[in-house]
Amino acid sequence: MKSWWKGRKYILAAVCLCLLAGAVAPRPAKPAVPAKPVQQAQGPLEGVTVLVDAGHGGTDGGAVARNSGTLEKELNLKVALALREELEKSGARVIMTRDTDMEYSRSKRADLTARLDLARKGGADLLVSIHMNEYRSRSESGPQVFYRAGQAQSRLLAGAIQEAMIQELKPSKARSAMAGDYFILSLDIPSVLVECGFLSNPAEEKLLLTGDYQRRVAQAIRDGIVDYVSLQIVETNSAND
């Protein structure tokens, strides 16, 4: 009996030593999981930073849709958010002046100055301010793009966007890009103010209230920006030849 227990003790001791060695021995390190590469957006607007301004906001509702009573600020934001998505899909970096219903100040000048400061600090290459139009005559219709007089590049950008909106939205009245005295267009970078349509026109108001048409407006603006940037690249390459 003693001899059996003596052999048993040796076996138990050996097992304990093996277990102890396993507990203190360093375990092999797990292979590191490689970090997923950051997917950089690629497209015709890669490397371009665009400030998208959803006009009005907060206590400043802007124009009021004649039939539905919808405030301009709401539609401006919807189009601006759709435009951000379209621009980012095309490779652009987008700065939004607002992505909610807010304002920077109840002073209109202070509010607009804060928006322009975002463009300066963010290194924006282009500025696009989104608005809705209205007029006392309910027959007026059609999107229209404005630029500051004397700014040649802003005029070209406005013309490109205006043409894209005509081609893609097929408005009943095809307007031309025009010079306008708007404070939001006072930076030295190419800047435009897009009046997407007339809320005072019953048919156009109905269109502007739909998500599908808002998306089409955003796509048209995006396409105009792409056309403008492509033209600048061609002109730069030609100048360097």
Image (cartoon, rainbow, N blue to C red):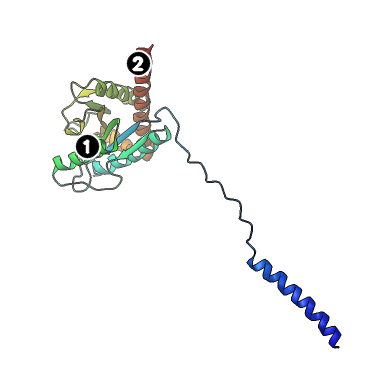
Q: Amino acid at mark 1?
A: Leu
Q: Nearer the viewer, residue 10 or 157?
A: 10
- Judge left or right: residue 233 versus residue 9: left
Q: Residue furthest bottom?
A: 1
Disc 1 to disc 2, C-alpha distance:
28 Å
Judge whether residue 73 can be spotted in this image: yes
Q: Could you say whether the residue bearing mark 1 is in a helix, strand or loop? A: helix
Residue 94 in the image, given as x and y percentages of width and height: 34, 37
For marks 1 and 2 on the same chain, the one whose residue lies earlier in the sequence: 1
According to the picture, the residue beneath numbered tag 1 turns out to be 116
Residue 50 in the image, given as x and y percentages of width and height: 32, 33
Q: Quadrant of the N terminus?
A: bottom right
Q: Amino acid at mark 2?
A: Glu
Q: Quadrant of the C terminus?
A: top left
Q: Nearer the viewer, residue 68 or 165?
A: 165
Judge whether residue 68 can be spotted in this image: no
According to the picture, the residue beneath numbered tag 2 turns out to be 235
Q: Could you say whether the residue bearing mark 2 is in a helix, strand or loop? A: helix
Q: Residue furthest top?
A: 241
Residue at 22% x, 42% y: name it: 56
Residue 177 in the image, given as x and y percentages of width and height: 25, 23
